[in-house]
Image (tube, rainbow, N blue to C red):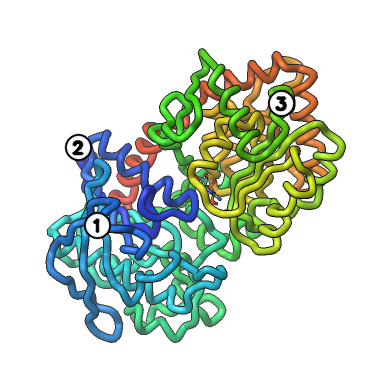
Amino acid sequence: MKPSLKIAMIASECVPFAKTGGLADVVGALPKALRALGHDVIVILPKYSAILDGQFNLRPTLGPIGVWMGNGQEWCAVHTSDYDSVPVYFIESNKYFDRWGLYYDADFNDYQDNSRRFGFFTRAALQLCRDLGFAPDIVHAHDWQTALAPAYLKIWHWNDPVLGGAASVLTIHNIAYQGVYHASDYDYLGLQRGNFTADKFEDHGKINFLKGGIYYADIVNTVSPTFANETRTPEYAHGLAPYLNNKGDNYVGILNGADTERWDPSVDPLIPERYSPANLAGKAVCKRALQRRFLLDVNPKVPVIGVISRLVPQKGLDLLAQTIESIVTNMVVQFVILGAGDKGMEAFYGNLPARYPGRIGSYIGYNEENSHWIEAGADLFLMPSIFEPCGLNQIYSLKYGTLPIVRATGGLDDTIQQYDERTGAGTGFKFLAPTARAIYYTTGWAVSTYYDRPQHIQQMVQAAMAQDYSWGSSARMYLQTYQKALDNKANG
Ligand code: ADP
């Protein structure tokens, strides 16, 4: 492998600039880890209106750049920030990105022109590499929003002096969102008519961004080995299993890491008191503060179960809704729930504190500080996902000594070791059935362990906090994948 690779990371989210989910955490952390290993990485993002120039020290860079779309040239401006150690470029197009949200409006309605917005952004990002003279060895695309990058490289830039040497990697963070849009936008995207076929972009008469990206990428990966296996089957692949299977061993699973600069209780600036495995006194302080903030009975002896999640069916929280009232009625336990999404679920979880005062607290909305407080202050963390490509909160929970209760699927299964009641080994509590009943009984198992076998809980907390899911080893696996992508490209 070359000692130093040039990598262009093109994505629609990146912490701390724009985030709706785990994609942003990954794009915020992986480039830093790659740079620490000696590689030259740039990140390219859309300039959403929520990204404020003053906050991140954004500066205009280059002149306006021209981007060829299917119907002619369009223009955009470019800004840059070295807010972190990695250079980040922002594509400014007021027409497409001067909006309230990233993908949808305040009522969760998708923007009607999302295919144009992200098609344009992706082509503009490649054009930016040309205008900067940044000749990447690897173009790394993420999810449907930038899945067209591998296609543009092969269809248009195979012979380009700057982009012609680039191999492409496409990472699937969530296969449920594929970017499926009306075919009337196909010509605008400039992907050539002849490629609108069922093996590439065509999907029941519509355009499917992710499907096309899978076809063209030199390597495709998802974010855990188990989810890579699961998505080779129709049950988990949302229609894409045949296309992923066509990739053979060019479809792999690489577990995400956790950004330990942001998620480590011994350095976390957001939590009420810091703590470490050697001294857990601060965790008790965090628990008391959490109980106070969420108006729970302040009692160190009652286990607190945390939930932080997008409120969507994928996360299994409609199943929890069927059983949470039985849990708090039949067990002496408290819940703190942080989430936003489905309006029905927002109303349900938002009303629970009034109906179960002192036992359930909730915050409906997106709130970074609360998410850190819950990781630090809760005893247990519930994540009953129906499918989970990797999942980050259970990894953060391990680091914060907050034992996960999870459904054994995807990355949840890969990262949590089942509790062994005879020895006290393990790092959490796992169940398989995607049912309210399984959530009820597994929560009961965790709660009874908390009361009846406290020495096992202490042992598991130590084992959990000792797990190493920092980005170093995941970044090394990405480097191996980049090399394989370069080999694939070289071998045609
Ligand atoms: P996904 O990407 O499917 O939403 P992940 O577990 O991979 O799930 O990542 C979710 C990320 O978003 C985590 O960093 C989590 O803390 C954060 N998050 C989710 N909902 C909220 C919320 N309401 N407030 C603050 N952070 C949230």
Which quarter of the rendering shows the N terminus? Answer: top left
Which quarter of the rendering shows the C terminus? Answer: bottom left
Camera-near label (1 vs 2) is: 1
The quadrant where residue 114 appears: bottom left
Q: Which residue is the site of mark 3?
A: 299
Vertical placement of 190 versus 372: above or below? below
Q: Which residue is the site of mark 1?
A: 89
Residue 490 in view, yes or no? no
User: Would the CB of label 3 be found within 8 Å of ligand 1?
Assistant: no
Q: Which mark is residue 3?
A: 2
- What amino acid type should be assigned to the residue bearing mark 3? Asn
Front one among 320 and 105 = 105
Q: Residue at x 70, y 63 (%)?
A: 344
Q: Residue at x 56, y 68 (%)?
A: 108
Question: How many other residues sit within 10 Å of disc 1, few (<14), some (14-19) or many (≥20)?
Answer: many
Vertical placement of 109 versus 18: above or below? below
Q: Residue at x 30, y 40 (%)?
A: 32
Q: Residue at x 81, y 37 (%)?
A: 441
Which numbered disc, 3 or 1, marks the residue that appears first in the sequence?
1
Question: How many other residues sit within 10 Å of disc 2, few (<14), some (14-19) or many (≥20)?
Answer: few
Relative image position of residue 287 (x, y in whole percent): 61, 28
Q: Secondary structure at mark 3?
A: loop
- What amino acid type should be assigned to the residue bearing mark 1? Tyr
Q: Secondary structure at mark 1?
A: strand
